Amino acid sequence: MVRSIGINNRIGLINAPTVFNSGFNFKQHWDGSVETLEEQIDRPIHAEHEMGSNWQEILSKLKQSPEYVSLFNQLYKDGINSDNIKDAIATFERSLYTPNSRFDQFLRGHKNALSSSEKEGYRLFKAYGCVSCHQGVNVGSNMFQAFGLFGDYFKDRGKLTKADLGRFNVTGNERDRYVFKVPSLRNVALTSPYFHDGSAETLEEAVTIMGKYELGRPLSPNDIGLIVKFLKTLTGEYQGKPL
């Protein structure tokens, strides 16, 4: 599904990113409009195309549950309120990290964790410059970048939407037009479709587009295949079990 479905079957405005490892993001949302996981929780609650609710309604419903009242009183001295709800949800979200991918094992010195073709894909990933944006603990999500450094992606794709303006919607600065938070590549093999607009259904498509518009060079089918093999090694584990 390209975009999430909210209340009354309303379709979201942008491709929702995975919540896994979101605690490592330097900002939240594609446009970086939110600093923390706690702050992010307010947005979908009030958005008409998502939950279409408000804190008064939510608090009223939760306080009708003896179980929730008891649990919140055990954990928070002031019981159920919006700040404590946001703290609880954000704490849970930070637990959704997925370590111990085969690439993590490789970085820890287990050289046989990757096959020779996967290692070559990693070499190409570095040689082509993909690591200039996709690096750090989350293999991304720690910087902004323009979508279309070496070509007009949006002109070629057509049907421009407000969501396509990216960080420009937040700052109003022309330099931020079409600028987005670089996504994490952890578990990328499991999180299609790709990009803020969900325009790429497969990793092969996504790598091809990145080569053209972010690297400014066509990638051979062989190199694309090897890079995709490497990307598939970024799938981690949750609570000790493979995703």
Image (cartoon, rainbow, N blue to C red):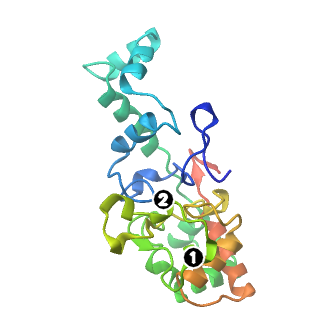
Q: Which residue is mark 1?
A: 155
159 sits to left or right of 172 = right
How many callouts does the rendering have? 2
- Which three-letter amino acid code belongs to the residue tagged 1? Lys
Q: Quadrant of residue 136?
A: bottom left
Q: Is residue 112 above or below residue 24?
A: below
> Is any atom of residue 5 visible in this view?
yes
> Is any atom of residue 114 visible in this view?
no
Viewer-proximal residue, 107 or 158?
A: 158
Instruction: Report crowding for label 1: few under 14, some 14 to 19, many 20 or more residues within 10 A (C-alpha).
Output: few
> What residue lies at 68% left-to-right and 50% top-to-bottom?
1
Q: Secondary structure at mark 1?
A: helix
> What residue lies at 38% left-to-right and 68% top-to-bottom?
143
- Which three-letter amino acid code belongs to the residue tagged 2? Lys
Q: Quadrant of residue 5?
A: top right
Residue 138 percent location from the top left of the image: 46, 63
> What residue lies at 31% left-to-right and 23% top-to-bottom?
81
Mark 1 and mark 2 in contact (Cβ < 8 Å)? no
Q: Which residue is mark 2?
A: 162
Residue 216 percent location from the top left of the image: 55, 89
208 sits to left or right of 6 = right
Which residue is the extreme one toward the front? 159
Whole-angstrom CA distance, mark 2 to mark 1, is: 14 Å
